[in-house]
Every structure is written in structure tokens, then in C-alpha cells.
Image: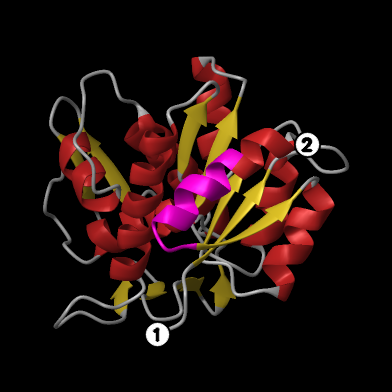
Amino acid sequence: MKPITILIADDDAEIADLIELYLAKEGYRCLKAMDGEAAVEAVMKYPVDLAVLDIMMPKLDGHEVTRQIRVKHHIPIIFLSAKGSDLDKITGLVSGADDYMTKPFNPMELVARVNAQLRRSFQFSRPAEGKGIVEAGGLVINPEERSVLFNGNLIELTPKEFDILYLLAGNPKKVFSSENIFQQVWGEDYYEGNNTVMVHIRTLRKKLGDAMNNSKLIKTLWGVGYTFNG
């Protein structure tokens, strides 16, 4: 079995070394990059399974690194940043990150989040038993390729957007609360005030609407949750 490889991209060498120390104890192979360009190059060159990215890096910031990675790869990305406002976190998630931690941070919590993201990634990289390609509302959703097509045209989604769409489209007419979606897609306990699902649904709707002439496939039942209307 090949070792799981994690990219650590941070221009602060002490922080990168600390993260490597804790992840290596878990048996992970670590690659380090000191700037955004080196981070993108590492993902393109090596079989990286997850990336921990600082946002404020030289050459390319974390948002641009994420955008470039997402062109070809769907690995989990965790932002680790000194920017800790709610707006910063929402911007990070919308740009394609799967999780967001602020500095200073507890290394053991980061390890736990890495483990959780990898579990979700490996689970969704395999189709659920009895479920494969889902066709609905003119969409073709392929869980093996993790691709979404409409009339043969690819719709670019982040990993979490794909997971949410696959969950909803694979269970048409079933209503999922934000808590249901968060627990099944993120694999973590939901807490009141968590607007992560709402933000991802909003961007997912925009991408689907742009590709499908404003067709509204995801319906909101106010106070209840979301359902796929394809």
C-alpha cells in the first residue's frame, strides 16, 4: 500500500516543520513548499493526497494555488491561516478549500481534521454499493471520475460541492437538513450557527444555474432543508 502523501505549504519554516512532525507521527509522508508556485508544482509532480495551505504565501496566495490545483485534482485542501474572520473563512471555503483553521492552532486538532478529510476523500472516491452514475435533470454525475456533465459539457465543482450534489441527486425528493448534509459530507458533528452548508449550496446553485440556463435543481424548504428537484 502506497504511503499517504500530504503537502504542507507555508512560508514559515517553523510552522511547516511542526506540522510535518505531527503528521509524520501518524505515518504520513510529507512534502513541503515555501511559496505558492512550489505548492502547485508539487501537486502536479507528486501523488499528493491532501494539502495544508497557508493563504498569505509569496508568488501565489492560497486561493490561487487552490484554483490551479482544482483544474486537474480533487484532493482535500485545508487552509491554515492567520486570517480568522468569518468572511475570511467563507471566502476560503467558496474558493475551494474543504476546511479552514486559524493560527495559532493546536497541532493535534489539525491532525484530527486531516484524518477526517482523508476518510471522507477515500469514501467518496469509491461509489457507494449499489450506486454508480446518477443521471438527473440533464446531468450525468460520475462518482468514479468525480465529474459532472450537462449536455456533454463539464461543470467544474469543488470536492465538497460534488459530494453535496451526488448526495442530493442520488436521493431525489428526499429532504436533507443542513445538519444531515454536514454530517454525511464532512463527517463531523454539526453545531448551531454553522453556515458552511449554506455557502456551498449557494455556490453549487450558481455553477449549475450558469451551466443550465438558471435551472433550479436544488430546492430550499425553509426551516427544513434542501432537496433535489430534478
Segment colored magenta: 18-28
Neighbor class of circle 2 (other Cα within 10 Å; few <14, some 14-19, many 20+) is: many
Query: Magenta stretch: dominant SS?
Result: helix
Does dot 2 land on a helix, a strand or a loop? loop
Which residue carries the number 1 mark? Answer: 1
Neighbor class of circle 1 (other Cα within 10 Å; few <14, some 14-19, many 20+) is: few
What percent of the width, then of the height, locates residue 98?
46, 46
> Per the image, is 24 magenta?
yes
Callout 2 amino acid: Met
Q: Earlier in the sequence, mark 1 or mark 2?
A: 1
Nearest to the observer: residue 66 or residue 224: 66
Name which quarter of the figure residue 99 lies in: top left
Front of the two marks 1 and 2: 1
Rounded to the nearest whole Å, what is the CA distance between mark 1 and mark 2? 33 Å
Apparent side of residue 105 relative to residue 65 in the rendered image (left or right)? left
Is 135 located above or below residue 159 in the figure? Answer: below
Apparent side of residue 50 relative to residue 26 in the rendered image (left or right)? right
Which residue carries the number 2 mark? Answer: 57
Apparent side of residue 21 relative to residue 113 in the rendered image (left or right)? right
What percent of the width, then of the height, locates residue 139?
40, 71
